[in-house]
Image (cartoon, grey):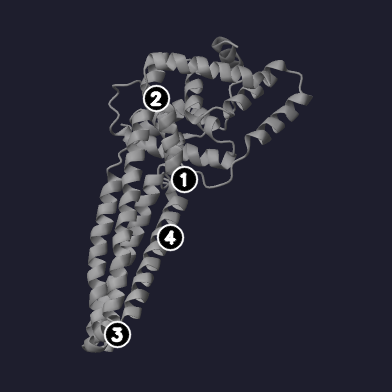
Amino acid sequence: MATEEEKFTSLINQHQGLIHKVCIMYENDPDVRNDLFQEIVIQLWKSFGSFRGEAKITTWMYRIALNTAISGFRKQSRNIKTEDIRESHFNISDHGEDNREEDFQRLQWAIQHLSEIERAMIMMALEEVPYEEIAETIGITQNNVRVRMNRIREKLRKLMDT
Amino acid sequence: MELDELKSIWKNNAPGFQSKDESQIALMLKKQSTSIIEKLKRSVWFELIFTLLAGMGMLVYALTLPSGALKWTSVSALILFVAYLFFFAKKLMLLNRYGLAHENVKSNLELLVNNLDSYLKFYKRSYAILYPFYFCLMLLFIGLERGADEFIAAITRPEKIVTLILLAIFFFFCSTWLTKWYLKKLYGNHLEKLKCLLHDLEQ
């Protein structure tokens, strides 16, 4: 019979991609990203006992991961400036030939220029999370999600065109 | 650019990451949380334990002293330490009010902003009360040291009264400024960031 801890580690193992994506979205420094990953796992573990399966497991994970990344975590080390990221990304893409890779790097760079709330929303949207679930996770109405998503899309378009 | 187009860019180049195995995840559960609330709790516990140890040391020292000003000083400091224990207990209560981060992002932000705000206000107010208290205590000890008659005669002179008032104002402003600066440096900037995020969500 698996213990609570074993059940939890296996669950995290299955869904760790979600946590990694949140970390990538909020931290550029690999060391800070690792600290954030660990903090999210600790917060999920603390909340695991009270999770009764009323919400989808991914909704519960998104809530805690995003809350930790947005409001509960204070980084210890330096932050890589977004300008540096763009430079490094474009340096790579200058030598590469794959347009899709370049588009992806431009998208990542543009996302870094969004506010923390907008980053949370676009990440869930890109991961095909339904608007209803995004609204539930962020704590706003579905209409508000639609309006904000239009604004975010417009911002990303402008940023990616520059 | 349509959302579907962005999704396709994202899907075709999903960000790479180094996946962790179950033993690495299990190891993380043994580590200490670095969340802001947990850090605050740890610092309050540290202050509490330090005060208890200092209080015990002071008690042992006071018991060895003969009657006199120094003994009274030690006893007063002990009373102050007891007051500090209530102060730490209240701080911990305020911090414990903040539960786990399983609310939605907006509710969690509201909860965190309210709790951090009331914690910092309590911190500022308690020091605003404690500093004048220390000032009065200092005057009392000078009185005990010099003798009541000489002390009263000294502090009733107009120039002494003016000096004392100026000193009290200077002491109060310096201490208030120091507390504000310390709290802003430690947690104020983080609180401002949280308030901005909440404002962004409420728009």
User: Which of the 4 image quadrants contains residue B14?
Assistant: top right
Q: Is residue A27 above or below residue B203?
A: below
In front here: B153 or A87? B153
Residue B167, percent from left and from top: 38, 72
Residue B27, percent from left and from top: 44, 43
Which residue is depicted at the point 29% across and 61% down? B129
Mark 1 and 4 residues: CB-CB less than 8 Å, in contact?
no
Q: Amino acid at mark 1?
A: Asn
Mark 3 Cα-neighbour bin, 10 Å: few <14, some 14–19, many ≥20: some
Q: Secondary structure at mark 3?
A: helix
Disc sitting over residue B157 in the figure: none
In front here: A7 or A57? A57
Identify the mark nearer the N-term, 1 or 4.
4
Q: Nearer the viewer, mark 3 or mark 4?
A: 3
Q: Nearer the viewer, mark 2 or mark 3?
A: 3
Relative to B47, B8 lies left or right: right
Q: Amino acid at mark 3?
A: Ala
Disc sitting over residue B178 in the figure: 4
In front here: B192 or B170? B170
Alpha carbon of mark 2 to alpha carbon of mark 4: how far? 37 Å
Q: Nearer the viewer, mark 2 or mark 4?
A: 4
Identify the mark nearer the N-term, 3 or 4.
3
Residue at numbered disc 1:
B189
Residue at numbered disc 2:
A138
Q: Secondary structure at mark 1?
A: helix
Q: Nearer the viewer, mark 3 or mark 1?
A: 3
Q: Is residue B194 above or below residue B1?
A: below
Disc sitting over residue B154 in the figure: 3
